[in-house]
Image: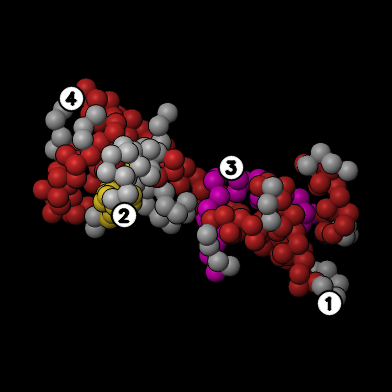
Amino acid sequence: MNELVFLDPNDINETPFTTSEVIAENGKVRHDTVQHLIRDYQNDIEEFGKLAFEMRPYGEGINGFKIRKSNAGRPEKIYHLNEEQATLLITYMKNTLPVRNFKKALVKQFYIMQKELTKRITTREIGKRAREALTDAIQGLPESPHKCFKYNQYTDLIYKIVFGKIARKLREEYGITKKDSLRDRFSAEENEKVDKLEQMISSMIELGYDYGTIKAALTKKYLKTA
């Protein structure tokens, strides 16, 4: 299934959108036709939010979506439309079979995206309790010069198991700083995996296991290595 709805950056605090290019491609109309339609009805469309756009060279698409190669090198304005804006725009297009089919597919993908975001928000709230339990377990450890680094150690261990990368590498991949929340970029399923490991580590710390023992046990269990 073609990806019709995006989240940029992959952050639960952002608004899902589709693009003028996606609408043109799937509605089987020229992109400049869609662009003209957006400009003609811009006041109507902006009743549902400010109209966003990006400038992109011809031939480059979002998330791997390819567009035509003509006029290569020239920048093209790609409009971003939220669910209400896209739905309104489609009502101004000719009611052809491709447009009708695309509208149904778009509605479904917006619904799926909103459902995923709702689930992600819920799991983030649940995850706060798991993270607090891990923090409390670490704070209960005997004082030592390295105690302040324990949370980062366990976090990197968890992310290595779930994503195959430590926190620093994930931040580089998402293009965010330490001030931004990595957990807001994770899917609901990924957050659930992180929560489960945080809860497991909290219990092991409270049972008296040290970091080396916990790392060895989880690595053997989840990474299939000794």
Quadrant where the image shows the N terminus: top left
The circle drawn on residue 145 is: 1
Location of residue 224 (image quadrant) = top right
Q: Earlier in the sequence, mark 3 or mark 2?
A: 2
Q: Nearest the camera: 143 or 8?
A: 8
- In this orientation, does residue 107 appear? no
* Helix, strand or loop at mark 3: helix
Instruction: Let me know if residue 190 is in the magenta part.
Output: yes
Task: Give the labeled residue for mark 3.
Answer: 189
Task: Give the labeled residue for mark 4.
Answer: 96
Q: Is 14 on the left-hand or right-hand side of 210?
A: left
What secondary structure do most residues of the magenta stretch adopt?
A: helix
Q: Earlier in the sequence, mark 4 or mark 2?
A: 2
**Amino acid, disc 3:** Glu
* Helix, strand or loop at mark 1: loop
Magenta segment boundaries in residue numbering: 179-203
